[in-house]
Image: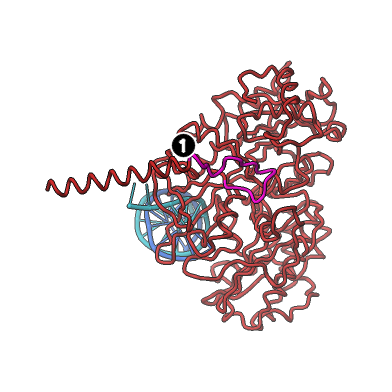
Chain colours: A red, B cyan, C blue
Amino acid sequence: MLIALGQRKRKWEERTKDIEELASQYQQKPLCSHYRPLLSKPWQPSSIWKLFHRQIQAFNFAKNCKEDVHVFALEKNAENKQRFYLVTTYTELWFYYNKHYETSLMHCYEVIPENAVCKLYFDLEFYISTNPGADGQQMVAVLIEFICKKLKQYYGMKCSSEDVLNLDSSTEEKFSYHLIFQLHNAAFKNNIDIGNFLRTIFQPAILLIKSKDPLVPEEKVVSTVSQSYEDTSYLPSCLENQIVTKDMSQSWQLNSHRIQEKETSQQTENPNLSFLIVNGKHGGKQLFVDLGVYTKNRNFRLYKSSKAGNGVILDIAKDNKFVPETVKNTSIEEQYFLSSLVCNVRFSNCLKILSCDNLEKTKEKSVCLDGSLSRSSSVPIGGCQSSPYPEIDNFIVSLVSKDNIQGGIRQWNYFSLEELLVYDISKYRWCRNIGRAHRSNNIMIIVDLKREIWYQKCHDPVCRAENFKSECFPLPSNICLPFLFKEDEDYVYIMDGNGNIEEKANMHKSTGLPLTAKHEKMGQNQRTSSVELDDELDDICFLEASEDVELADAVTNLHPHKNWAVDEIPDELLIDALKKQEVDEVQV
DNA sequence: CAGCGCTACCACACCCC
DNA sequence: GGTGTGGTAGCG
């Protein structure tokens, strides 16, 4: 007994000694002593890499992070499809992912947060055995052409197959594609709205499928296809005769009239949607486009990832025509990776947010943040629509309720990349640029959840031309995320050098030392976002995520045309800014 | 110790003709 | 027989 205890004690002492030795090594030779993500390449990893068992814990942690972090889901393996939730930045994920395809990161999914602005994306699939002769690539081409046409029709967006990233994950059994639209200066309000949009434009096909269901009475069925002018030779032989009657066509027109008040004149252009319909695995008709992927917090498989239990990765398809712009010091592969991320959408003044309410409500709207493009059919949303943060909404309403004017929130949009809430204000038009209210243009208030600040921007063309952005004001602490979300860190996992996930105490990733609250909050002043990858960034994007944020902001205000990283700002400018802003207790 | 968000489907209760 | 509700298996 005593001997065993003695052995245990010695083992424990050895282990403690090893850890202490390792810790002193890291202290002497820190891994990230000169980390300057905007300057040095190859860059070094930041410290944000945390795994959680529960999605909610991952989101709560991410919301308290100062970096551009995102939540990803990892499938463990084929036997155990249990999922973990990883919080990290795009850049850091790529850094490890790129090297560890065959480890824990091989089954990795982007979590598309509910309410987050995102790109138009598609999951396409059909079983090859039940669809003999179906030409998947040709069907994809027709689909893209159709979607581009509808984007033009509904939102005035111009795009072509060259703006669509085609990813292929097909097997001998199943044709499987992902499409990610890279629209210029436009994105959808959230993935629910994408679903609404697609259900609207695919409605004839959806109803046609339902009509094959004996439970649906035939007279309720509406469809399109008055003229079937398109080549259907790529269709599976079983679908060649799926042409719908003229009565159905009229029905669709009626129905469509209710859906889109202004579009009745265009109905004659409706193409044959039978290209959308395929045979299911066990018979029955289904859509080529999976409409089940537009739900809250949807997991969408990453470029180069495979499903657990199936070795087929999502790779650039042979027929892909999208080529990302090359960016200095980054590989084309990384650019493809960033393009494939559905939520990698950066806020800017000219970004058009596309939205679509669900079919029952039958309202269509498209709003441009710069106000320069006309809004389509719908009425503006009346009153105050609440965002996921009612406390912040209340604060915004209090900001725009002054001088006997009761302003309101016309609409809000959430950018998960930078954690920005962009509020379009109604009724209240006071602009800090001109020192009075605009006559006809509305203002917006941007809440930066990471920097815990808010500022005003403007829809007015003159203010826009100046790229006006007001001073930054601190958010009251009781509406900041750390206050609203108390993070749960009971279970923290890290990945070892081989990319394997191990359960660990709550440790600092680079040093292996226990992580203190201060480390957490400081985030080591590191920026690993795609900031340095995008030449056309809005000024708001450059100088953030640091302890010195206010100072950096002050410098930006003084020198709006320079874009410095926090640690690049010349000392004299910092001092100027200090004087101007009377910022205390800032370490230069 | 440990996934999440649906939808389709089923059983059952209640109501009306 | 029609309609509403609540629970859940199983899909994506």
Q: Main secondary structure of the magenta part?
A: loop
Whether A23 is drawn above or below A342: the answer is above
Could you tell me if residue A219 is visible in this image?
A: no
The picture places residue A140, in percent across and down from the top left corner, at 70, 70
Where are the magenta residues, as a range?
A: A27-45
The picture places residue A373, in percent across and down from the top left corner, at 83, 44
- Secondary structure state at the residue bearing disc 1: loop
- Residue appearing at x 79%, y 46% in the figure: A376
Give, as a three-letter code, the residue at label 1.
Answer: Glu
Lateral position of residue A17 relative to residue A61, left or right:
left
Q: Nearer the viewer, residue A568 or A342?
A: A568
Could you tell me if residue A197 is visible in this image?
A: yes
Q: Residue A6: which quarter of the image?
A: top left
Q: Residue A384: which quarter of the image?
A: top right
Lateral position of residue A375 relative to residue A179, left or right:
right
Disc 1 is attached to a residue of which chain? Answer: A
Q: Nearer the viewer, residue A565 or A253?
A: A565
The picture places residue A237, in percent across and down from the top left corner, at 66, 83
Quarter in which the C terminus of chain A is drawn: top right
- Residue appearing at x 82%, y 56% in the figure: A158
Residue at mark 1: A487
Label 1 Cα neighbours within 10 Å, binned few <14 / some 14-19 / many ≥20: some
- Residue appearing at x 74%, y 38% in the figure: A380
* Residue A384 falls within the magenta-colored stretch: no
